[in-house]
Image (tube, rainbow, N blue to C red):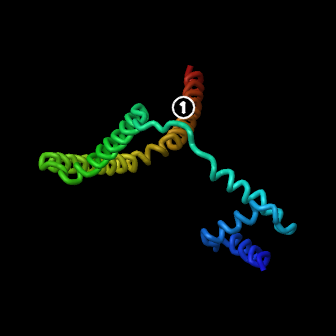
Amino acid sequence: MVLNNIDELIAKYNDAETSLQEEQQLRDYFNSDDVAPHLEQYRPLFKYFAMTQKETFTKDVPVIPNTKKTNRRSMYQWIAVAAVTVLMLGFLVPKALGPSPEEVKEQELAMAYYNQTKEALSLISIGMNAGKEQLNPLGTLPGHLNDGVEKAQGFNQLSKKIDNILNQTQTLKN
């Protein structure tokens, strides 16, 4: 009967369903010399728990905290708070205050100057494109010059022939 009870308590212990009184029964059973052979594997576990209950902490615990670590941690926390504050002010202040009336006027004036400059450059561009179209006939000028040179050479040949004829007539007259 006791062995069946111990088997049931072990099953409950493994499922973490035992009460404190049941765990005490298990400890008492495994600390005795009368342990069933199939339960010998649990004996070192319960002996370990019994030994660790007897252990005590003997070192002195300092009552005063380490001020260097506390001061350093406090300093880092304040630096973090300051950084967040600066970032928040940097984002919120310009939006809350907005641009001043002078800045708005300067921006409008700058935009007007920009638009006037853009229109002037557009007019210059139109004028340059028109001038370029007027210069297109000059692009054919080298071809016309070559034609003129060929015709001029023809005149040179004609003038040579005329000179020959004139020279022959003069020699005949003489």
Residue 28 percent location from the top left of the image = 71, 64
In this orientation, which residue lies closer to the viewer: 104 or 169? 104
Q: Is residue 170 left or right of residue 98?
A: right
| Quarter that holds the N terminus | bottom right
Instruction: From the viewer's side, name the closer residue of 88 and 165.
Output: 88
The residue most toward the left is 101
Q: Is residue 161 left or right of residue 89?
A: right
Picture quadrant of residue 27: bottom right
**Front position in the image: 161 or 2:** 2
Q: Secondary structure at mark 1?
A: helix
Query: What residue do we see at 43% from left, 47% from top?
Result: 137
Residue in view at x 68 percent, y 56 percent = 49
Point out the image quarter for the C terminus. Answer: top right
Q: Amino acid at mark 1?
A: Ser
Residue nearest the viewer, comparing 133 with 53: 53
The answer to whether residue 4 is above or below residue 84 is below
The image quadrant of residue 41 is: bottom right
> Residue lying furthest right in this view?
37
Displayed quadrant of residue 29: bottom right
Q: Residue furthest top?
A: 174
x, y percent for residue 101 = 12, 49
Whether 22 is drawn above or below 154: the answer is below
Q: Residues within 10 Å of mark 1 (few under 14, many from 20)?
A: few
At x 82% / y 65%, what residue is drawn?
A: 34
